[in-house]
Each structure stands twice: as C-alpha cells, then as structure tokens.
Image (cartoon, rainbow, N blue to C red):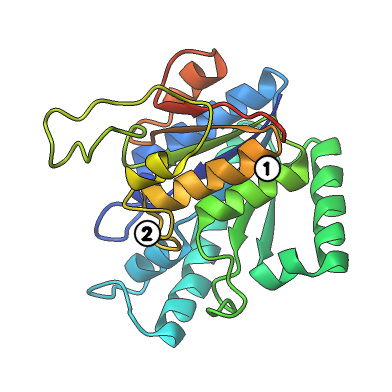
C-alpha cells in the first residue's frame, strides 16, 4: 500500500522547540518496520521552524518572516540529519524534497516533482517532503502541511493520507472545552455541517488547525484517497491504522 504520513510540529518537538527524541525515534522505527512489510511510504514533515527555534536558542517562535525563514534554514538541516541518522540504523535511505506552492501550480515543475517522487519510490527510497519555508512567502506558499500532504498524496497516487496531530480525530464539539463532545469515527462526505465543527470552511486555513485537516481530507476524498486524522502523541498508532483498526477519524475516499 502506498501511504503518505504527515507529522506535525507537536509530534516532533517539545514546546521548547527542541527535538522530542522519543517521538521521532518511535516514528522512524515504525515507518521502517512498515516499509520492511512492503508498504511504500512518503513522509510529509513539519518541524523545521520549531527545531530552528530550539537550535538558535530563541526565546519564542519568531513572528517576522526573515527570522522564520532563518530558523527554517537552520532547523531543516537538523531535521534531515536526524531523519537520515535514524532511518540509516534500519537500513533505509531517505531523500529530501522541498517545494513551494508555485511549484505545485506550475505544470512543468509539478510534472518534474511527480516524476522524481515516483522514481524515488521505485528505488526503495523514503521521500521526506516539506514546504520550502526558507523562500516561501504568502504569495507562493502552499499554506500548511496538511494541504501539502493532500497534494503529495494525489501526486503520488497514494491510497491513504494519515495526518498525525495533537488531537485524536474530529469531534462533535471541541473536546478541550466540552466534556460531552464525542468523536466521529467515520465521515463519508464533507459537508458545511462538518466544516462548521471546525469553525467554518474558511476558518483557520493555513494555521494547521482542524479546518486545514478537513480541507486536506476533502481534497483527497475527491480523488478517491481516504484520510485518517489521529493522535500523533505516540507514532506507534500507525500500526493500528495499517491494520485497519478504528483509530481517530476516517474520511472514506470516493472519487467523484
């Protein structure tokens, strides 16, 4: 099975910005094991800016674009060094692909991206993809890695997109505020009512919130690609997802 796994900053780093060693080691171990089982995997990884903040010993996440991009440049090195080292321990080769929204909207660049991605998979490589935060601005940014995950899943011809995040699925209300909120295990059609659970269709797009995950799921469902939103607090949850167990919220893809 060909699967895209997107991991958020909350999975990869502590609130200090420093690497969450336990999480990233577990993630690489599980993904390596799943590759050994014959699955084709693509990792869409956040965390460059967060890791750069920690590496530069900044007191807080920067708000100005030049410092964000500087942190991303530093953090991306740290992130890929860590991935390369950990996956190498399990005899797997990784590749880095950095893209922008402009690349995805340019026919020739997008074709080159797809060709490279498919060839890497043929060679048994595990591609690790991130938005090129060092050059991305509002005009050329994809916007968030949830959307990037959906774009990659479509380009790769994946069967499944897994979004590992800091919440374990879609709820009838915000579970952090409403103790009566119930998880919705299966969504077969994304409606305005579903988007309303995340504050509306236009709410929080580009910020990594639930709205961006619903948008990503919607993009995938139109291409017949299913999406799972699950808690990334323990990356070993990937085993349950690959075994077809009920974890988080499944958005069942059905090509239009």
Q: Of helix, strand and loop, which one carries label 1?
A: helix
Residue 22 in the image, given as x and y percentages of width and height: 35, 37
* CA distance separating discs 1 and 2: 23 Å
- Count of numbered tags: 2
Residue 109 in the image, given as x and y percentages of width and height: 83, 67
Q: Can residue 85 be seen in this view?
A: no
Q: Can residue 172 be seen in this view?
A: yes
Residue 198 in the image, given as x and y percentages of width and height: 34, 47
Q: Could you tell me which residue is drawn at 43 percent across and 49 percent down?
A: 8
Q: Is residue 188 left or right of residue 38?
A: left
Q: Could you tell me which residue is drawn at 62 percent across and 29 percent down?
A: 253
Q: In which quarter of the image is residue 17?
A: bottom left
Relative vertical location of residue 150 with respect to residue 232 in this rendering, above or below: below
Task: From the image, state whether disc 1 or disc 2 is nearer to you.
Answer: 2
Q: In this view, does 92 lie to the left or right of 72?
A: right
Q: Which of 167 and 90 is in front in this view?
A: 167
Relative vertical location of residue 142 with respect to residue 11 in this rendering, above or below: below
Neighbourhood count class around disc 2 (C-alpha, 10 Å): few under 14, some 14–19, many 20 upward: some
Q: Of helix, strand and loop, which one carries label 2?
A: loop
Q: In this view, does 214 lie to the left or right of 153?
A: left
Quadrant of the snapshot with the N terminus? top right
* Residue 182: numbered disc: none
Q: Could you tell me which residue is drawn at 48 percent across and 55 percent down?
A: 46
Residue 12 in the image, given as x and y percentages of width and height: 40, 48
Kindly give the residue lying farthest to the front in the view shown: 192
Evaluate if marks 1 and 2 touch, with contact meaning CB atoms under 8 Å apart: no
The residue indicated by pointer 1 is 153
Q: Is residue 131 left or right of residue 70?
A: right
The residue indicated by pointer 2 is 203
Relative vertical location of residue 83 with respect to residue 49 in this rendering, above or below: above
Neighbourhood count class around disc 1 (C-alpha, 10 Å): few under 14, some 14–19, many 20 upward: many
């Amino acid at each position: 099975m060909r699967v895209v796994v997107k991991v958020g900053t909350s999975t990869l780093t502590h609130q200090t910005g420093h690497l969450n060693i336990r999480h990233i080691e577990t993630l690489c171990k599980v993904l390596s094991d799943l590759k050994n089982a014959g699955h084709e995997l693509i990792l869409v990884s956040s965390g460059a800016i967060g890791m750069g903040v920690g590496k530069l010993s900044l007191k807080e996440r920067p708000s100005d674009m030049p410092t964000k991009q500087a942190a991303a440049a530093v953090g991306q090195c740290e992130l890929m060094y860590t991935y390369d080292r950990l996956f190498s321990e399990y005899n797997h080769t990784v590749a880095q692909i950095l893209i922008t929204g402009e690349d995805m909207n340019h026919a020739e660049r997008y074709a080159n991206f797809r060709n490279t991605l498919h060839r890497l998979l043929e060679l048994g490589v595990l591609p690790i993809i991130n938005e090129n935060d060092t050059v991305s601005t509002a005009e050329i940014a994809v916007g968030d890695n949830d959307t990037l995950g959906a774009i990659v899943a479509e380009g790769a011809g994946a069967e499944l997109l897994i979004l590992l995040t800091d919440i374990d699925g879609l709820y009838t209300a915000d579970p952090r505020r409403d103790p009566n909120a119930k998880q919705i295990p299966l969504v077969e059609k994304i409606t305005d009512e579903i988007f309303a659970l995340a504050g509306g269709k236009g709410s929080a797009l580009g910020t990594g919130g639930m709205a961006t995950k619903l948008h990503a799921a919607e993009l995938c469902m139109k291409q017949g690609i299913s999406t799972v939103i699950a808690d990334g607090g323990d990356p070993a949850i990937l085993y349950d997802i690959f075994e077809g167990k009920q974890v988080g919220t499944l958005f069942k893809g059905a090509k239009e």
